[in-house]
């Protein structure tokens, strides 16, 4: 994979031509994000990350890498590229990569427009990202585009509860207030359905994000591959 536009090493990150607009609350949220999810990490999410990322191999691209909660869990891979469109989170990510001694490349890019060639990536990673991207269909289409034939998307995402359930009704009622509080995160998305529009689901498991608010507790974890043409 050639060096993407806007790529940096761990200690700094430069703006891309399509810089993400960051609100004042987004800046605050980036600084408190790790503390907000800390209990969830202790109650199972850290172990899920490690289990998921054990299967990462080759050239690896993580979308929406945020503050870098996955960085320490990656096994040795040929190349690791971490994308994050929000400037404050990207700065925190770059500093974390430096602390970990990782040689990962940090890129200013949103999931809907990845600055990497078609069919150039062995593994794409998405953990609690597709809830937040403005256009989930475009993001999944980009994942499908950049994956090599036989490549894999490894994902953990929180999802809409089953139709008719009390939790789903609360997710629907609180979707807008939650999005305003959680920097655009939607608690009412059918993530698996979105994945199936562009990818073949190889495996998927349901779980619960303990230690987090109920509206984001339903989880799916699994892998998907590009469709064979």
Image (cartoon, rainbow, N blue to C red):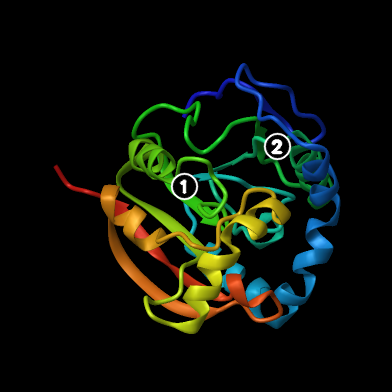
From this viewpoint, is residue 30 visible?
yes
Image spot of residue 70 (x, y percent): 66, 58
Which is more toward the observer, 52 or 172? 172
Local secondary structure at mark 1: loop
Q: Is residue 55 left or right of residue 199?
A: right
Give the residue at mark 1. 58
In the rendered structure, which disc, 1 or 2, sits on the residue that comes first in sequence? Answer: 1
Choose top left, top right, bottom left or bottom right for residue 4: top right
Image spot of residue 130 (x, y percent): 50, 52
Give the residue at mark 2. 86
The reply to whether discs 1 and 2 touch (Cβ–Cβ < 8 Å) is: no
Which is more toward the observer, 147 or 103? 147
- The residue carrying pointer 1 sits among few (fewer than 14), some (14 to 19) or many (20 or more) residues within 10 Å by Cα, namely some
Which is more toward the observer, 93 or 189? 189
| 57 up-or-down from 87: above or below | below
Local secondary structure at mark 2: loop
Image spot of residue 103 (x, y percent): 70, 41
Taking the spot 65% from the left edge, 35% from the top edge, the residue there is 85
Picture mark count: 2
| 155 up-or-down from 171: above or below | above
Taking the spot 65% from the left edge, 81% from the top edge, the residue there is 210
Q: Is residue 96 left or right of residue 227?
A: right
Q: Is residue 35 left or right of residue 165?
A: right
In front: mark 1 or mark 2? 2
- The residue carrying pointer 2 sits among few (fewer than 14), some (14 to 19) or many (20 or more) residues within 10 Å by Cα, namely many
- Quadrant of the snapshot with the C terminus: top left
Q: Residue furthest top?
A: 17
């Amino acid at each position: 994979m050639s060096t993407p536009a806007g790529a940096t090493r761990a200690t700094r990150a430069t703006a891309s031509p399509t810089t993400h607009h960051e609100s004042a609350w987004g800046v605050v949220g980036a600084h408190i994000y790790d503390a907000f999810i800390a209990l969830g990490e202790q109650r199972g999410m850290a172990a899920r990350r490690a289990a998921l990322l054990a299967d990462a191999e080759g050239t690896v691209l993580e979308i929406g890498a945020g503050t870098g909660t996955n960085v320490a869990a990656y096994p040795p891979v040929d190349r690791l590229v971490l994308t994050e469109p929000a400037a404050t989170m990207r700065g925190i990510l770059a500093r974390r990569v430096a602390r970990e001694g990782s040689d990962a490349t940090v890129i200013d890019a949103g999931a809907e427009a990845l600055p990497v060639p078609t069919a150039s990536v062995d593994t794409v990673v998405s953990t609690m990202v597709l809830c937040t991207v403005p256009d989930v269909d475009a993001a999944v289409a980009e994942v499908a585009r950049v994956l090599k034939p036989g490549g894999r998307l490894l994902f953990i995402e929180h999802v809409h509860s089953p139709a008719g359930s009390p939790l789903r009704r609360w997710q629907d009622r609180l979707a807008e207030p939650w999005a305003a509080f959680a920097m655009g995160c939607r608690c009412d998305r059918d993530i698996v359905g979105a994945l199936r529009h562009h990818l073949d689901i190889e495996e998927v498991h349901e779980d619960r994000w303990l230690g987090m608010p109920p509206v984001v507790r339903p989880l799916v974890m699994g892998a998907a591959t590009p469709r064979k043409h």
